[in-house]
Image (tube, grey):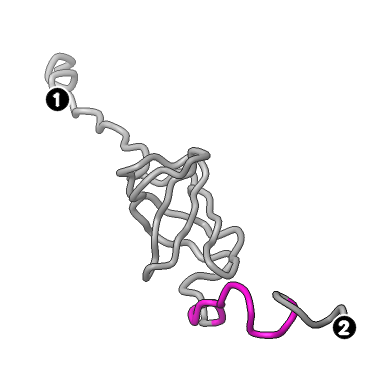
Amino acid sequence: MDRREGPGRGHGEGRPMRSNYFLPKPVKVGDVIEATIEATASRGDGIAKKDGFVIFVKGAKQGETIKVRITEVRARFALGEKVEGDASASPQPEEPSDSSDETEEQ
């Protein structure tokens, strides 16, 4: 038997490729999107989805709605990071306007 023949050596054998492997991805490197973190991965990254495409976001917590900058796109998922200064990620309480200061000075 030739070394090139035999189980697992021919074309078309092994794990089949998914049809969406070569389809265009809904995000590209540098995109900034708004996403809701649906779950947390085993390594602690947040998991968001855009049109069913998985995006791992470092440091994001489940339930957060944040802006994400895409840093890397792979065949089946993308990596992203939180955009700093996103108001929805860390809401700042509004300072109540104290009109009593103005009336005391008069």
Q: Residue furthest top?
A: 104
Q: Which residue is mark 2?
A: 2
Q: Nearer the viewer, residue 81 or 45?
A: 45
Residue 71, horizontal then vertical, whole percent: 60, 58
Q: Is residue 45 above or below residue 24?
A: above
Read off the magenta span. Answer: 9-22
Amino acid carrying mark 2 in the image: Asp
Residue 30, horizontal then vertical, whole percent: 57, 64
Determine the secondary structure under disc 1: loop
Amino acid carrying mark 1 in the image: Ser
Residue drawn at point x = 17 percent, y = 22 percent: 102
Q: Is residue 73 left or right of residue 83?
A: right
Q: CA distance from mark 2 to mark 1?
A: 91 Å
Q: Which residue is mark 1?
A: 99
Q: Quadrant of the C terminus?
A: top left
Q: Nearer the viewer, residue 67 or 12?
A: 12
Residue 77, horizontal then vertical, whole percent: 52, 63
Residue drawn at point x = 64 percent, y = 79 percent: 13
Q: Quadrant of the N terminus?
A: bottom right
Residue drawn at point x = 33 percent, y = 53 percent: 36
Q: Crowding near pointer 1: few (<14 within 10 Å), some, many (20+)?
A: few
Determine the secondary structure under disc 2: loop
In terms of sequence position, does the residue under pointer 2 or pointer 1 come before the other?
2
Q: Nearer the viewer, residue 34 or 18?
A: 18
Q: Is 12 part of what is drawn in magenta?
A: yes
Q: Is residue 62 above or below residue 98?
A: below
Residue drawn at point x = 48 percent, y = 61 percent: 32
Q: Nearer the viewer, residue 95 or 32?
A: 32
- Give residue 50's quadrant in the image: bottom left
Magenta segment, prevailing SS (helix, strand or loop): loop
- Give residue 15's quadrant in the image: bottom right
Q: Is residue 106 left or right of residue 45?
A: left
